[in-house]
Amino acid sequence: MPETQSEKSAVARFALIIVCLGSIIGPIGMASVNIAIPDLAADLQANAKMVSWLPTLFILSSVIFMLPASKLADNYGRKRIYAYGLALNAFSSFMCGLGTSIEWVLFWRFVQGAAAAMIFGTGVAIITSVTPSHKRGAALGIAAACVYVGLTVAPAVGGWLTELWGWRSVFLFQVPIVIALLLLIKLRLSGEWKNDEKTQYDWWGTGIFAAFSSSLVYGLSILPNILGFATLGFSAVSLTLFIVHQSRSRRPLIRVQMFRESRVFSMSLATSLLMYASNFPLVFLMSLYLQYVKELGPSHAGQVILVQALSMAIMAPLSGKLADRFEPRLVATLGCIIVACGLYILSLMNTETSITYIVCSLLLIGFGFGLFSTPNNNAIMGGVQVHEVGVASASMSLSRTIGNLFGMSLVNLMVHYYLGNAQFTQEQNPALIQTVEMALNMSLVFVVVACVISALRGKSRTA
């Protein structure tokens, strides 16, 4: 029996609630770990090089599994893959909390990244599937705001948990919350959203893309070693093979022709990649700077860092409404410019910089990023045909995670170069400050380029 309009609206509202809850939990699990890194490193006797892999492996796994997860969701159901991702996230978090060595934690962080790919690769597609196009910008804005709410509370939650119960609690606390959300999906969220016909899965494409991502990260981490340059060359060849393979495949993971067919789609993705490459390493770097250089406790450091995500959370719903009424390109570009100003101000900090100065800089960055993200997401989803929203959603998440991965990989390189196998101590503060300064300048360059691309992308069309 066909659903009535009121029933469809009820399902859309509840689906949005479910996705939003997952969008809060996921970032908390990802970002709160950054605040616990000093305690984790001390307890497991991990050096700077090993510690820098904690966020990198998480993002690498997300990149590798993002397209497979979205393709499986299109074939077997977006709600199903979303729920499986939540379950895997809970299990891998539990295993991280049991870790007795840094290698153990790194392995399960990689698994946790795969779970994140299943969650974020399908969440936006669920919202797009059930929300009318004229309300999509507002719905995406709410979902984006929830991501930023998760990012907002993550540093504070990570700091409080670390001080009260140690670093393991940062992983373990989310397990019962995820289980409760899974029960809610099972009992209350009816329906399923997938393609009418199943398509064959491209295992070759998945393997080639995994080779590209892994070799890119590893190659960057060991520069300027000659093996690093050779590995990066292999990464470039793998990317070329992936593009050629996808363009010739009858059942591709992603239809690369989409990038040629829509200038707005392709340039919006490029802007997203650069913006996230500039932003993701910030929490990791600021956590180390505030706790080692400024000697703040985990709780205090978390409260300083949360102002950036708080301003994002405030701006994301407003920018979503602006994207429904005005040209998304203009709103997003303004956000890019504001982020560039904030990064420039932050890049001038040193050992004597006041906490107030840092807070104001982070506030400006968050304000601009919140203004950028939702209009840019709306432009991406509006640049494809309706039957390709699943792939577009995955492409959007993929551009974000590749940006995160690329930015964090470059920071990895800087950490390896300046700090190497040294333990984090007061004696290493000059090297840490050099790392932070170089990373902030790198981020500023990325944002300036993103401003130009965003301004030149052209007008968006309605999905």
Image (cartoon, rainbow, N blue to C red):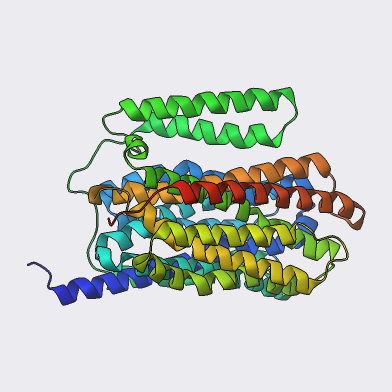
Image point 58% across, 72% down: which residue?
311
Q: Quadrant of the C terminus?
A: bottom left
The relative height of residue 443 versus residue 20 in the rendered view (above or below) is above
Residue 413 x/y as whole percent:
72, 40
To which quarter of the image does residue 462 belong? bottom left
View extreme (left): residue: 1
Image point 71% across, 71% down: which residue?
359
The relative height of residue 339 versus residue 166 in the rendered view (above or below) is above
Residue 268 x/y as whole percent:
44, 49
The relative height of residue 281 versus residue 224 in the rendered view (above or below) is below
Q: Is residue 47 visible?
A: no
Image point 80% across, 39% down: which residue?
417
Total marks shown come to: 0
Closer to the camera in the image, 192 or 176:
192
Q: Is residue 349 left or right of residue 57?
A: right
Residue 453 x/y as whole percent:
50, 46
Closer to the camera in the image, 312 or 242:
312
Q: Is residue 314 visible?
A: yes
Residue 372 x/y as whole percent:
50, 61
Q: Quadrant of the N terminus?
A: bottom left
To which quarter of the image does residue 204 belong? top left
Closer to the camera in the image, 452 or 200:
452
Image point 42% across, 61% down: which residue?
375
Q: Is residue 92 left or right of residue 48?
A: left
